[in-house]
Image (tube, rainbow, N blue to C red):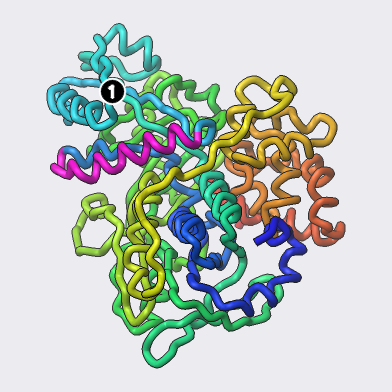
Amino acid sequence: MTAAHWRPQGRELLGDLLELEWDLLVIGGGITGAGILLEASRRGLRALLVEQRDFAWGTSSRSSKLVHGGLRYLKEGRFGLTRESVHERESLLREAAGLVEPQSFAFGDYEGRKPGKRSMLLGLAIYDRMAGQRERHYHTADEFLRLAPHIRTDGLRGGICYHDAKTDDARLVLRVLHEAQSHGGAALNYLSVRSLVRDGSRVTGAVLRDELSGTCHTLRAKATISATGAWADQLRVHNGAAPRLRPLRGSHLVLPAWRLPLAQAVSLMHPHDGRPVFAFPWEGVTLIGTTDVDHGEHLSREAAITQQETDYLLAALNDQFPSLAISENDVIATYAGVRPVIDTGKADPSKEARDHALWLEDGLLTVTGGKLTTFRVIALDALKQARALLPHWQADLAPQPIFRAAGALHNAHRLPPGQARRIQGRYGFHAQSLAEAAGEGELQLVPGTETLWAQLRWATRHESVQRLDDLLLRRTRIGIQLRRGGADILPRVRAICQPELGWSDERWTDEEAAYLALWKNHYSLPRERASER
């Protein structure tokens, strides 16, 4: 696959690409599908990934942005899962520095609050051993208040600090896809599955619809993997299987960093139901999440936070940070993602397990569930199952480094402080080309964000941007970092990106209107949406 396939005009080659017979068709362009594409391509399979919307459009751009080792699983006695998660976290911290970054967490030790000091410290001792490190965790109340100012002091006995990691989830997907591309993998967005192709009862491909042109294509593949997350049951039911998933919604608030300034992430238990809630610094803003509720909306519609969820998260904030009096007026954006979990009928959604699952049904291999952190493990498990469909493929499935090392960035002094590491983490071996492609003033930051203007130009030139929301919500995260989705900077975005995209003035105007409407309906506060009706 050449870089042209990532460009908008690369879709002119779509017909030729889909006429080929592939070893592997991967359906779903989130982190699981991207991981499968990478691990298959680097092992010699001719692999194609298709995504019905945009890459990372679903859960993989709306997660809590955490790459964590599964500390919560220790209390359930699931040491193997925690060890696996810690190992993957450490690998990502090494190989994707600048994209996956350490994040310290602070947890207040309050009188009468669970989990208590003893159980937390025991869990962290095991956690440290798994990561091959050792550090001091407990701090007196005075020390803890210096680490986490503004927190509630009533009943505070001290506090516990530990380390995990965070990422830009959508950019992680793009980095994995770029890596897969370098090994010969192909990925196409806005290409949906209309039906499955069968030889007898066995799935041997799919009828694909180009959502931009409306044309349909029949694609043949020796193996087909559905990695569509919460949407997996839709394809399974079409294949004659019974539904097995319980879609759960996790919603988040975004505040400007100055309104809730945090050096550490603050983890707390919600005063109403004891569920964990966190607030942490991310990309120049502060994220607060998450809820965990049944998602009753149709999955064809983008998820959005409800008023009940908004009130729930604000109640947690004001219980932990009472002196700041945070209100809806401080919220600059919201977002909500839908997580797939296996439905076991538990009354409390939070009690459902988050393990990944694989089902091979009439030649369709479905993989769903799991965590962002362990996407490589999930991908390799899927390929082990896929061997039954590829009898002549005998590749070694031992884990390999996820990313190739990126070379040093020349003229890094031209970038704002910290940006060389950040750009290398997000773009890998393309980082130098991104910096060289920047126009005048484009190596400066977009005000209020940690994003370079040059990232906008690069994305529109090389990363298959088909809609304006692709650019502002996933290639960059400006849409959730600035008020009104970044409406105030759209004139400069247009000046940089419209020529690269080749859009007419009419097309740009339509895209801008559609983006702002989407933002209002799905990324603003519920009361703001209601005021527009």
Crowding near the residue tagged with mark 1, few <14, some 14–19, many ≥20 C-alpha atoms within 10 Å: few
Furthest residue toward bottom: 200
Q: Residue at x 82, y 58 (%)?
A: 503
- The answer to whether residue 61 of the structure is visible from this angle is yes
Instruction: Using the image, determine if residue 363 lies above or below residue 503.
Output: below
Q: Decide which of 257, 59 is in the foreground and name it.
A: 59
Q: Residue at x 38, y 85 (%)?
A: 202
Instruction: Using the image, determine if residue 85 lies above or below residue 361.
Output: above
Q: What's under tag 1, amino acid-wise?
A: Gln
- The answer to whether residue 467 of the structure is visible from this angle is no
| Percent x, y of residue 169 | 49, 44
Q: Is residue 387 magenta?
A: no
Quarter of the image with the N terminus is: bottom right
In the rendered structure, the answer to whether residue 109 lies left or right of residue 437 reads left
Q: Is residue 83 magenta?
A: yes
Our reading of the magenta stretch's main secondary structure is helix
> What is the magenta range?
75-96
Q: Residue at x 54, y 65 (%)?
A: 49
| Percent x, y of residue 345 | 20, 64
